[in-house]
Amino acid sequence: MSQTLFRSKGFIPLDNNIDKLIAFTPSLDKNWRDSQRIKSKPYQVETLDAIKQFQDNGWRISGANQTRKKNRQISSHSIKMEHPDLIIRNDKGQREAVSNILINNSCSGTKPLTLDIGAFRMVCSNGLYSINSLSHAEIKHNNKNIQMLPEIIGKFNSKAEAVLNEFKKLKR
């Protein structure tokens, strides 16, 4: 897993605004993908469905970005989410450690939707980060997984408790 996975670089900040998310990440919308002649699988697991389910569990959208092919066509998108209860602040009230969920999905359904939960912590004032990936899940685009999406996300969401324990270790 890439060490830059949970950083903000390249992500448009969205402050949990779903309308901004859709405006800045049009590839989330099936109608937009159809208008761009991006063929999707018939049973595509939609990123917006996963985002809404995470939001129901208290996660907030913090950023989004899209990846383009050499021909400039959008090929995938990434959404970063944070949970306000999984942030550690220092004595000055500044964010010291943050948990993130990163959702990646291809526009065409050729690659599975991936979920990664992790944590990063600023180790020192010169910008050094400690990054840990705590869990990874892949959801293939098929009818079974569409129906099981709430269960898959529920199990993944329960792993978020491990983030708090990881923060305590990092803080020591």
Image (tube, helix red, strand yellow):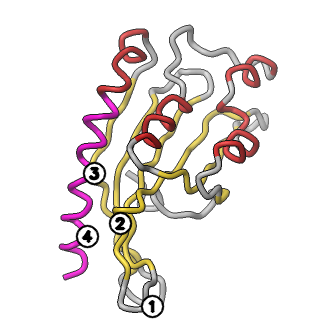
Residue 118: percent from left, percent from top: 34, 56
The residue sitting at 71% across, 35% down in the picture is: 74
- Magenta stretch encompasses residue 155: yes
Q: Alpha-carbon distance for marks 1 and 4?
A: 18 Å
The residue under label 1 is 125
User: Distance of mark 2 from mark 3, alpha carbons?
Assistant: 15 Å
Going from the N terminus, do you reach mark 3 or mark 1 first? 1
Q: Which mark is residue 167?
A: 4
Within 10 Å of the Cα at label 1, are there few (<14), some (14-19), or many (20+) other Cα atoms? few
Q: Amino acid at mark 1?
A: Ser
Residue type (three-letter) at the residue carrying disc 3? Ala
Secondary structure of the residue carrying tag 2 is: strand
Mark 4 surroundings: few (<14), some (14-19) or many (≥20) residues within 10 A: many
User: With respect to residue 98, does 27 lie above or below?
Assistant: above
Query: Number of numbered discs present?
Result: 4
- What secondary structure predominates along the stretch shown in magenta? helix
Dot label at residue 131: 2
Q: Earlier in the sequence, mark 2 or mark 3?
A: 2
Q: Quadrant of residue 112?
A: top left
Q: Which mark is residue 95?
A: none
Report helix, strand or loop for mark 4: helix
Pick the front one: 36 or 154: 154
Q: Which circle's residue, 3 or 4, is located before the other in the chain?
A: 3
Q: Position of residue 86 (x, y in %)?
A: 34, 63
**Figure quadrant of the C terminus:** bottom left
